[in-house]
Amino acid sequence: MNIAYFTHSLSSCWNHGNAHFLRGVLDELIARGHDARAFEPEGAWSRANLLEDHGEAGLAAFEEAYPRLSPQLYHADADLAELVEHAELVIVHEWNEPELIARLGALRKRGAPFRLLFHDTHHRAVSAPEEMRAYDLSGYDGVLAFGETLAEVYRGWGWGDDVHVWHEAADLRRFHPPAQEGHREGLVWIGNWGDGERSAELEEFLLRPAQTVGLPLDIYGVRYPGPALETLARFGARYHGWAPNARAPEIFSRHIATVHVPRRFYADRLPGIPTIRVFEALACGIPLLCAPWDDAEGLFRPGTDYLIARDGAQMSAHLEALSLDPAMRADLAANGFETIRTRHTCAHRVDELLALLDRPAIAPSLTKETA
């Protein structure tokens, strides 16, 4: 099958978590013999920031880890019909310009033979619905939503059976437990500070518990403003800046545990949607502890695959127990990896996508609301 995916960026994971999942899915499709290509706009914000911070060397980890992937950069005024001339399936990520999304929809409405799907992996449908409603999706055959609660939003906008839940997942070719265990020490957190969506939660569930238990804490990520860096220093955390996602397995392998602190929109208004880091951490065989979130879709086995802390005090207790009990750490790591291996790999998601495409194609409906 000839598949075209329009992404914000495939080459850069600088504050761009969707790149993690997309790399694994496209690589899996190619490994199965499909012609899967990614198109990313020239000057994309994520890639531009990566190049500004690290130069061309910042792209090296992606290129080395994914030799089968070579995204095509395109101009804003590119001939889209030419880019997708042979495509049987076109998927467009929500972090694209409204004009691009509308132009691809117009091609489909004019009779282009490909199936056209919109892929949403963000909380803007509930945090900024006016932005999403500005997208013209009237030419699209369906929506891929990365969780059931997000899919429900699109159903409320008139998509009905044409919205499909397509969770993120781990790329087990690269994210897996270390072949040989080495020395592990302290706690690690890989994530971006962002826009203050979870500042208080990070202090309660990550920074203070690590300090209370006396565990060294290493932090990797971007968009940490001055006050955030001062907070990290106050709690004794070691900040390392950006790390290529391809290096995450190596980073996880040096630490005894990691923590998931969901952004407020995912904890409160889109329950049941974990971030890509949950899948990747469990895939890498590192014990995971979570701030409160509701696994509303039963993706995992809370208490077996990972531990939930209802507050900072319980997080401190979990961390202390883990630090003193290697067998407990080994059990959590094995359980979490088993759930990923059997349910949540990029290979599973490719199977789901191909099964979805077996359904009869439905022509775009002009009665659907825009986004």
Image: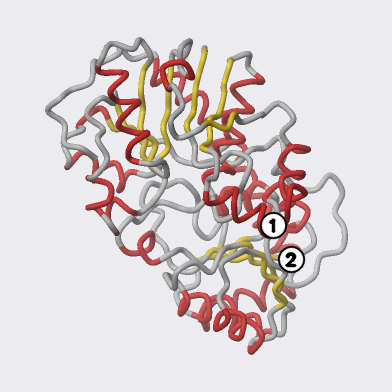
Identify the residue shown where x is 30% and y is 25%: 105
- In the rendering, which numbered label is found on residue 286? 1
Towards the viewer: 47 or 128: 47
Identify the residue shown where x is 39% and y is 17%: 357
Going by the numbered disc 2, the residue's amino acid type is Ile
Q: Along the horizontal axis of the image, is 325 left or right of 222?
A: right
Return the disc, 1 or 2, that comes first in the chain's sequence: 2
Q: Is residue 329 above or below residue 340?
A: below
Going by the numbered disc 1, the residue's amino acid type is Ile
Identify the residue shown where x is 40% and y is 42%: 146
CA–CA distance between discs 1 and 2?
Answer: 7 Å
C-beta proximity under 8 Å, tags 1 and 2: yes
What residue does disc 2 label? 256
Q: Along the horizontal axis of the image, is 69 left or right of 39?
A: right
Question: Helix, strand or loop at disc 2?
Answer: loop
Q: Is residue 229 above or below residue 263?
A: below
Question: Helix, strand or loop at disc 1?
Answer: loop
User: x%, y% of residue 248?
Assistant: 71, 53
- In the rendering, which numbered label is found on residue 312? none
User: x%, y% of residue 341?
Assistant: 62, 38
Identify the residue shown where x is 49% and y is 49%: 300
Q: Along the horizontal axis of the image, is 301 left or right of 295?
A: right
User: x%, y% of residue 172?
Assistant: 67, 37
Residue 286 occupies quadrant: bottom right
Residue 342 occupies quadrant: top right
Towards the viewer: 77 or 29: 77
User: x%, y% of residue 271?
Assistant: 35, 56
Would you call the spot at circle 2 few (<14 residues within 10 Å), some (14-19), or many (20 or more)? Answer: many
Q: Is residue 281 above or below residue 81?
A: below
